[in-house]
Image (cartoon, coloured by chain):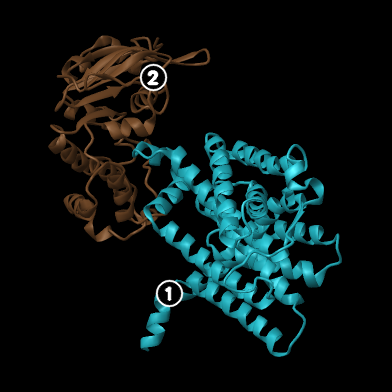
Chain colours: A cyan, B brown
Amino acid sequence: MQRSGLLQRIPMKDRIFAVFVVAVIVFIAIQAVFGLSVYYVHFVSNLLIFGIASMSFNLLYGYGGLLSLATAGYYMVGAYGGMLAIRYIGNNFYIGLLGSLVTTAVFSFIVGAVATRIRGVYFFLITFGFSMLPYLLIRGPTREITGGQTGMHMRVLPSFFFDLKNTYYYFFFILVLLIAVYILLRYIIASPFGRNLRCIKENELKLSSLGYNIWWNKTLAVIISGTLTGFAGYLYLLKNLSISPVLGTYFMSAKVVLCTLIGGLSTFVGPLVGALVWYLIEEFLVQPGFLEIILGCALVIVILRFPQGIVGEFLKSMELKKKG
Amino acid sequence: MKVLEVNNLTKKFGGFTAVNNLSFDLEPGRITSIIGPNGAGKTTAIRLISGEIDPTHGEIVFKGKRITKSSLNRHALLGISRTFQVPSVFNELSVIDNLRTAVRAVGVEKRIHDDRCREILEEVGMLQDMHVFPRGLSHHKKRILEWCMSVIQEPDILLMDELGAGLADSELSMLYDLIKKRADTITPLFVEHRLEFVFRISDKVIVLNQGAKLAEGTPNEIKNNEEVRVAYCGDEYGEGD
């Protein structure tokens, strides 16, 4: 009884997250025990990196009501920021990390400071504009240092406390970071700033009339979300070792939005589940080219029938069950 | 010492003048009400004073300081609080978190936040609703909660936009007693449609019609003012102006 009492106290959404983590670990353990190829380890690592980006996006959209299309921009700035720091400053994991975080923080501050002055669909459009900025800069004017369309390749891996080349180690590294980001985001949302963010979604005018600076609260949310997305970009860089501007096309931003809608935007685990669904469909169910059609239909069904998304609807049904 | 002076305030929306050359002042401890027929510019006046919108011209002087061009949140921090026509509380947060959000905005010491929240909930008799989410509360309690969120910030002026809308007489009287009790420190300014209530509680009544000030005076003066009567009810022949 004592144990079930403890379990009861953990919110359902955190339990879903725990199940997700355990499932991923079991899946990878099976791969390792039977000595299968590392293909699916890469697959899951990519999923988790994308998951970090989606969860960070949901801080803005699900909690703050700010539909941002700049995810691809942050992701690419994070990856290129890390790459350039490693290439031109020093071949070290931490230098790259710092380069990545600082550049995305600055970039997202610029996006936030400008875009949050505008509301609704205009916010959406202006973030879309910003998301294309790094893409165009990297391909065009800064071609000499960023490698242009061909991208950049990391020849020597930066030193770290474990061998970054080891697929299994790197997978666990990402998993730990995913959990850390999840806890961080949950902590942020429970904090006074998180309360403000939820209030902005509900009634911006009222929050402002209480004396809060809406612009700064929104900008801070954009900076946090953008920097974490950039961090995911840096993890992607270290995993794949080469990057190109294709990484940051608008499709990436749209993918994050769609995964969040499918998984459910009321929790952080929602986008993660949405990403899982996306990756599974992409991998097992369809020939290339059909993905967009299937996902388009799935999105229509989700929005019309299950506006809360997979996780949201599940939580709702659990609550109804509890009430009897 | 006047706590608020409004001088020649004008607001135009395109070609439409919502507030036209409005001047009045608020004295601490005195209850002032703005009344007028629909579309008279009452809510626009509130929006101007609270800093939500900038006036086309004219000035607002708060405690001797010109604050005409300022923002909603800046005005709130200076000490001009406001409640809305539709009770505006945060349904996503519990009652106590609503109050915490309010008290945290103004520089109150952190460790007494919860005490202050409890105190005010106890005063209005809502202590048992502390952890309830406002969507489960009655309209009346939402109004009280919104009022508490303003009062807990200890503003100098409290602008209340149609506080009485949707409340029963007994509920309104209870709120009125609470407001009256604090009138010395928190100067109230009502925008109201319920005239019997306005005439009972106000020290000064300002009548707006079509954006401009039609009359200003004590409730009795206003009651006997022919022009006001015409603006509200039309003249003898029922044509109005």
Residue A75 location, x and y as percent?
Answer: 65, 53
Say if A72 sits above or below B202 in the image. below
Q: Residue A296: name its quadrant.
A: bottom right
Q: Amino acid at mark 1?
A: Ile
The local secondary structure at tag 1 comes to loop
Residue where numbered disc 2 is placed: B40
Residue at the spot of label 1: A10
Which chain is mark 1 on? A
Residue situated in front as seen by the camera: A166 or B88: A166
User: Residue at point 15% right, 33% down?
Assistant: B185
Q: Which residue is rendered at x = 73% and y = 46% of the image?
A: A146
Percent position of residue A306, x then y: 63, 61
User: Quick check: can you spot residue B110?
Assistant: yes
Separation of disc 1 and disc 2 at Cα?
A: 54 Å
Q: Does residue B170 appear left or right of residue B192 in this picture?
A: left
Residue at 37%, 35% (x, y): give it. B85
User: Dot 2: what SS?
Assistant: loop
Residue type at numbered disc 2: Ala
Q: Identify the subunit bearing mark 2.
A: B
